[in-house]
Image: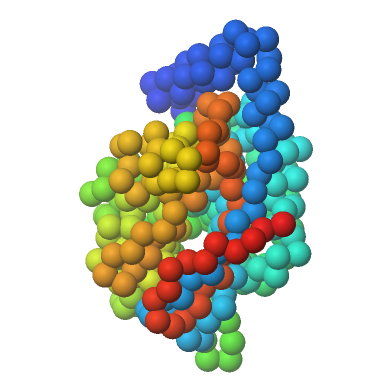
Amino acid sequence: MARSRSSGKFKRARLRHALFTRGADKLLGGRLLERHLENEIVVREHSIALPSWRSSHDGLRIGHMTDLHLGDLMPIDRAEATAELLNDRELDLVAFTGDAVDLEHDGVDRFFRTLASVPAPLGHYLVLGNHDHLDDPEAVVGAAREAGITVLLDEAVSVSTGPDASLRIGGIDWAKRPSECSEKVELIAGDGEPPCDLLLSHNPKGFIEAARLGIPLTLAGHTHGGQVAIKGRPDRNLAVAHRLSAGFYERDGSVLFVSTGVGAWFPLRVHCPAELVVLEVRSGPWSDPDRLPAD
Ligand SMILES: [Fe+2]
């Protein structure tokens, strides 16, 4: 991984940002960005029971954050305040599924320090998204590790949860195509069966192989839920290239949760609020996730 501001991808992203964010905002006299930044970030609590979830991890509470896109659409103060919404949630671990930054990575070290200060005895984990790769992925990884966050690059770690129990958390680096995602999931497989209890993948397409391998739970982001959805149907949205675009999906007893994320890549969200998620995972007969009231 190397600094890549001269790459075509970075230049295209900068052009997109100039058109859809700065350009659109200028046309509307600065009101678009101002309104976007006034939108509340909601904290959603979900509780889900999975037959494949080990009873030793019954009731695990995960703070799931994704797609921050630190930059013009997510100033550092708002980013830190967002992370602080996870304080006092009695979490066991915090999972960040990519796109911490939008273009440049400046300021992300400060955000990671705040994220790492969220109480979570089993730790803080991060995978990279496509935007983290635009500028300087090594700097993003370095800042996260410096803050005490475990960065998972096609690997899994085990964390002790009791005298004879451990939770295995895997994470794959950004990949675009389903076949690339599958290859990365296979890299973490090792001897374990399933290879991990929990998989973090920026791209929801990582779930295809995760389900085949019997990984009970995968957390993803990337789609932003299209940022514009049909009222009451978060899965019917502008992310038309993604069949798995928002909410819970099940395949062969494995579950994927795709969060619509806290940030944005254009300053508009319609029927698709920015969200931070607290997920309580129980061991037991499959249940539809309850949407619990969030304060
Ligand atoms: Fe994103």
Question: Residue 145 at what x, y percent from top left?
Answer: 61, 53
Vertical position of residue 182 compared to residue 283: above or below: above
Q: What is the quadrant of the N terminus in the image?
A: top left
Q: Residue furthest front?
A: 232
Q: Residue furthest bottom?
A: 163
72, 276: nearer the viewer: 276
Q: How is the image coloured?
A: rainbow
Vertical position of residue 59 compared to residue 228: above or below: below
Q: What is the quadrant of the C terminus in the image?
A: bottom right
Visible in this render: residue 10? yes
Vertical position of residue 171 compared to residue 287: above or below: above
75, 122: nearer the viewer: 75
211 vs 148, left or right, is: left
79, 153: nearer the viewer: 79
Visible in this render: residue 146? no
43 vs 219, left or right, is: right
The residue drawn where x is 73% and y is 38% is 78
The residue drawn where x is 40% and y is 38% is 237
Vertical position of residue 242 compared to residue 169: above or below: above
The residue drawn where x is 67% and y is 10% is 29
Question: Residue 278 at what x, y percent from top left?
Answer: 60, 62
The residue drawn where x is 50% and y is 78% is 282
Question: Residue 199 at what x, y percent from top left?
Answer: 42, 63
Question: Residue 201 at what x, y percent from top left?
Answer: 42, 54
